[in-house]
Image (cartoon, helix red, strand yellow):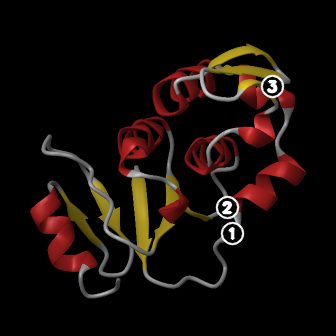
Amino acid sequence: MLHIVFGRLPEAVFNTAVYFKNSYEDSWITDDFAKRAILDVDKSVVLGNGVIDSPVLGKIAPNSLSGGVKTLILIKNEPERIFNASTCGDNCAKWLLEIGRLQDITINLRHIMDFGSEPFAIHIVNTDAVVHNMREMVLIAGRYV
């Protein structure tokens, strides 16, 4: 399940770009999930564990991916850590929900992310409530962000 802590959370990894640069593993990039997320969010194709073909930047290294994709990859591969998912845009929301369907993850949000109009199940840690739509989530998140 996807668990969210809204507001400032000192133990969360705040600078995900620096953390990614110093901890990612090549196998994370060639994982099916990472390939799909990179294609969807960054419109780029993984050619190998160290090379991604970006339509804007050409051939790039994993460190040049967007902050959102790097954060998604970290969340998927280090589920025991809490990452600042406010580095992700709303285009990452469906990927956070997908990871949450596969495994328990906790993220920190310092803004209200748009998880869309489809029903979902997200546990809000701040209040220990499970919300099922954006209206329910906004009513709680607004108190913390």
The quadrant of the picture occupied by the C terminus is bottom left
Label 3 with label 2: CB-CB less than 8 Å:
no
Q: Which-is-in-front pick, marks 1 and 2?
A: 1
Q: Secondary structure at mark 2?
A: loop
Residue 66 is situated, as x and y percent measured from the top left of the image, at 62, 44
Q: Residue at x 31, y 75 (%)?
A: 128
Residue type at mark 2? Answer: Arg
Q: Residue at x 68, y 69 (%)?
A: 13
Q: Is residue 81 positioned above or below 116 on the image?
A: below
* Marks 3/2: CA–CA distance: 19 Å
Residue 143 is situated, as x and y percent measured from the top left of the image, at 26, 88
- The residue identified by callout 3 is 27
Residue 96 location, quadrant? top left
Q: Is residue 17 positioned above or below 136 on the image?
A: above
- The residue identified by callout 2 is 81
Q: Tell me the crowding category of disc 3: few under 14, some 14 to 19, or many 20 or more residues within 10 angstroms, Cα based.
A: few
Q: Is residue 101 left or right of residue 119?
A: right
Label 1 with label 2: CB-CB less than 8 Å:
yes
Please report whichever mark, 3 or 1, sits nearer to the chain's N-terminal start.
1
- The residue identified by callout 1 is 13
Residue type at mark 3? Answer: Ser
Task: Return the residue found at the far top.
Answer: 47
Q: Tell me the crowding category of disc 1: few under 14, some 14 to 19, or many 20 or more residues within 10 angstroms, Cα based.
A: some
